[in-house]
Image (cartoon, grey):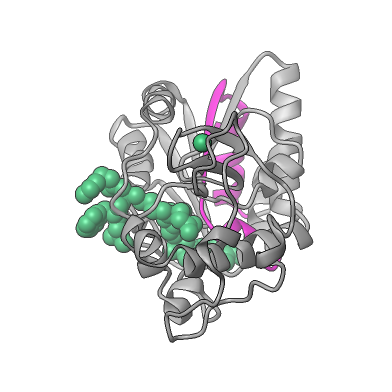
Amino acid sequence: MNTVMKSFKDTLSSGKNILILTGSGISAESGVPTFRGAGGFWRTYQATYLATPQAFKANPSLVWEFYEYRRDLASKVQPNKAHEAISNFEKKLTSQGKKVTVVTQNVDGLHQRAGTKNIYELHGSLFKTQCTKCDNVEVNHNVPICPALARASLPEQDDTSEIPVEDLPHCQKNSCGGLLRPHIVWFGENLDEDLLNKTEECVENCDVCLIIGTSSIVYPAAMFAPRVAERGITVAEFNLEETAATKSFQYHFQGPCTVTVTEALDI
Ligand code: BV8
Ligand code: ZN
């Protein structure tokens, strides 16, 4: 093991309150495209357009096709060694009376399927819906979520969808009948206040921080790890390449996170 990794692991071994921040890069080796990679959603399908309240208002069927495609994909892939390493690390440290918190930007649910318990999904979940009329939020793992979306595929460049709005998922709570939307934070939407407060508390109290598989471009998620570093706390970045935030961190471990994270958490 190289001396830099050894020195990080020594620091990690004395940590009692570990914050682990993750982005889409941690799910890449499971087969979930990242937002900026070659097959990324954004480059090809303008997710920055589709992941907005404006797009949903203008064309709810197109946005639902985009999300059903991702629900189908996420339900078919498996957590990878990096997700598993984090889950095993949490179990081990918790048994020693220490605390591990995962704060993820991901909406694919792979951390939870790998067994992670203490997790905040900053940007929501592909497997939760919220009602546009009564705001009811529900877990929904049905794939397809409704018959009309059974053949959802990534929408082509032309922004059309033949699915009539009445065939999209609607609220079953009481007799509401409101149109459902994915329980996802879209661009231009605020994050959940309670989740933000809990994340801020971790940022202020953690004694070691890992930031894994994120380009640190999207705010406010991108500001947490630099805030930890400003407190003089050790932050280690795990990424295939340097990012916008690398210069703020004490450690940068380059490579696929199934290798680097697995090694780092094996303490
Ligand atoms: C907000 C859910 C207050 C959706 C997501 C103009 C108008 C309005 C807002 C803004 C504006 N300009 C800027 C903003 C703020 C905006 C923002 O940050 N925009 C960006 C584009 C600059 N933020 C917001 O709008 C947020 N809300 O600010 O509210 C407000 C309100 C009104 C007006 C102003 C402000 C809400 C942001 C949440 C958006 N929702 N997700 C969905 O999933 O469909 S964001 C989504 O993209 C992800 O959740 C994630 O956060 C982000 C993608 O980033 P990454 O996860 O980092 O993925 P990426 O592909 O970029 O990078 C992958 C990394 O992994 C790479 O570095 C790669 O090298 C690495 N990697 C790849 N493979 C591996 C690997 N590393 C290791 N191993 C590997 N194998
Ligand atoms: Zn409702």
Number of marks drawn: 0
Q: In the rendered image, is residue 267 in sight?
A: no
Quadrant in which residue 117 is drawn: top right
Let me know if residue 35 is in the magenta part. no
Name the foreground residue: 61 vs 237: 61
Q: Is residue 140 visible?
A: yes
* Residue 30 falls inside the magenta stretch: yes
Vertical placement of 25 versus 36: above or below?
Answer: above
Q: Position of residue 161 (x, y in %)?
A: 51, 76
Which residue is pictured at 51% across the width and 84% down the height? 156
Quarter holding residue 205: top left
In this view of the protein, which residue sits in the foreground, 136 or 163?
163
120 to 182, vertically: above or below: above
Q: Residue furthest front?
A: 175
Task: Residue at 39%, 53% (x, y): give it.
Answer: 186
Indicate the position of residue 214 as horizontal and vertical percent values.
47, 57
Residue 228 place in picture, x, y as percent: 36, 34
Look at the image and tell me in which quarter the C terminus lies: top right
From the viewer's side, name the closer residue of 15 and 126: 126
Furthest-top residue in view?
97
Q: In the rendered view, does 228 fall on the left or right side of 24?
A: left
Q: Is residue 56 left or right of residue 156?
A: left
In the displayed structure image, the side of residue 139 where residue 88 appears, left or right: right
Residue 264 point in image, percent of width and height? 65, 46
What span is colored magenta in the figure?
A: 2-31
